[in-house]
Amino acid sequence: MAELIGARQMTNNDKKAAKLEKRLQEWKIVRQRGKYSYILRWGGLMSMIYACGNIYHHHLNSPKIGFLSVAYYLTIWILWGFSIGLAMWYGNDHRYLCAMKQQDSTKDDSKGKQ
């Protein structure tokens, strides 16, 4: 029974390691595209979704929507979206660098034991 549990745990660990490796490879590709590309994609997408949502909601409550209202919402949500995109970039990049450092130390440890 203990051997069966150990085998299951080993396969779970292998699955987690494979999933981590896949995510690291995906982030490596994103990093190669660049920070500003990532921020423009995520931040721009999020800001447009939220700006359109707010403008639509504002238009439902008030049939007449002015230029200043649209400009206000676009400005606020564009700044918010790019801030979120930048925060996501730095958070993901920090996790990537920590994982790469951990992989390097694991490889160094396994070389030292041989």
Image (spheres, rainbow, N blue to C red):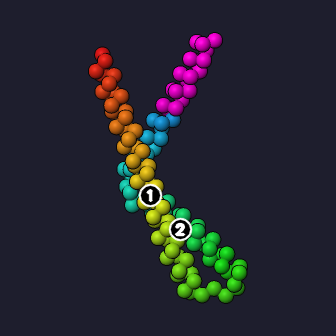
Q: Is residue 60 above or below residue 5?
A: below
Q: Locate residue 12: give its quadrant.
A: top right
Picture quarter with the N terminus? top right
- Image quarter (top left, top right, bottom left or bottom right) of the C terminus: top left
Spot occupied by residue 47 in the image (x, y as percentages of width and height): 53, 68
Q: Does the magenta stretch mainly form a helix, a strand or a loop?
A: helix
The residue that appears at 37% across and 55% down in the rendered structure is 34
Query: Where residue 95 sits: x, y (%)?
Result: 42, 45
Which kind of residue does numbered mark 1 sit on? Ala
Q: Which residue is mark 1?
A: 87
60, 98: nearer the viewer: 98
Q: Is residue 34 visible?
A: yes
Q: Circle 2 is placed at which residue position?
A: 47
Q: Is residue 21 above or below residue 76?
A: above
From the top left corner, tell me how far across and down residue 29 is, in percent: 41, 47
Residue 70 magenta-highlighted: no
Q: Which residues are magenta?
A: 1-18
